Amino acid sequence: MNKKIFQISFFGLFMLFLSASCSKNNEQSDAYGNFEAKEVSVSSMSNGQLLYLNMNEGDQLKLNEVVGLVDSTELYLKKLQVLSQHEAVLTKLNSINAQLRVHQQQLDNILIDKNRIEMLFKDGAATLKQMDDINGAFSLAKKQIEATRSQTESIHAEAKAVLSQVNQLNEQLRKCFIINPIEGIVLTKFAMSGEVVTFGKSLYKIADVSELDLKVYVSGLQLVNFSVGQEVDVLIDKTKTENKILKGIISWISSSAEFTPKTIQTKEERVDLVYAMKVTVVNDGNLKIGMPGEIRIINKPFKN
């Protein structure tokens, strides 16, 4: 009786071991890696004292949100000076236009006299000298108008150049505002209010965590099983013994091989060369930057 019980128990343990072995092989993932996000380092676009930078690490920022300001007092005063120059140029232009109207009126008056003298000359009531004098006055008046108009064109060009300076200053003033470029979470803050910053100095780093990329590595033998756009299962730790399965899309596969990173295990325990691959996963709130993950081909054949 005891021998029969022992045989049954041994058979049960053998089946349990076989089942566990098959399950383990079947559930083996195809690649391993860590999650990363598309990070953006936001830098200062101008020089000066940082008047404020309203954000802290971990804050959620909106697209095009104004989060800081570099001191723009000097630029603003320079803009006022250039605007004054523009007003002076416009005043000069108004004066030239007034002169132009006077010359035009003189030309109109001379033209009336010219027509009258020509009629008198035909009737013999005007002399040749009178004709020469009126023609000379008419020609002089026309040249005065042309000269005045050339001044007007020169002043227009001057006003346009000054206005261009105003536009340049407006652009420099715009760059004094720190405008957040993407919607995301602040990862690192590099500067504080009151600091003097220069062009190109990093102020903070932000990442869009609505989608994360799981960067994994596969061997050359595995590479034929993957293609860009392919859907795969992504596994993350749920408990010590359970995984949570998400859906991911392969968004990038490296075209060149590299040596296996020390922290990565592929399907084979160790290989010399592997190919990097990124799997984009919609973040349901459980994914964090740097978190480990695994991928598995969907509907992978059972392997005993």
Image (spheres, rainbow, N blue to C red):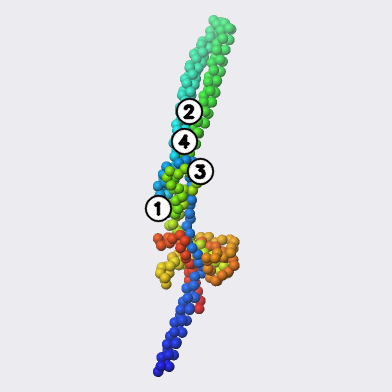
Mark 3 vs mark 1, CA separation in Å: 24 Å
- Amino acid marked by disc 2: Gln
- Amino acid marked by disc 4: Leu
Question: Is 54 positioned to the left or the right of 152 in the image?
Answer: left
Q: Which mark is on residue 199?
A: 3
- Amino acid marked by disc 1: Asp
Marks 4 and 3, the one that precedes in the sequence: 4
| Dot 1: element | loop
Q: Which mark is on residue 85?
A: 2
Q: Nearer the viewer, residue 35 or 125?
A: 35
Marks 1 and 4, the one that precedes in the sequence: 1
Residue 175 seen in this snapshot: no
The answer to whether the residues at label 1 and label 4 have Cβ atoms under 8 Å apart is no
| Dot 4: element | helix
- Amino acid marked by disc 3: Phe
Residue depicted at x 48% and y 55%: 38
Residue depicted at x 42% and y 42%: 51
Bin the neighbour count of mark 1 within 10 Å (Cα to Cα): few under 14, some 14-19, many 20 and up. few
Mark 4 vs mark 3, CA separation in Å: 15 Å
Q: How far across and down, in percent of the image, does residue 74 sit?
A: 46, 35
Q: Which mark is on residue 75?
A: 4
262 versus 171 height, above or below: below
Res. 49 image quadrant: top left
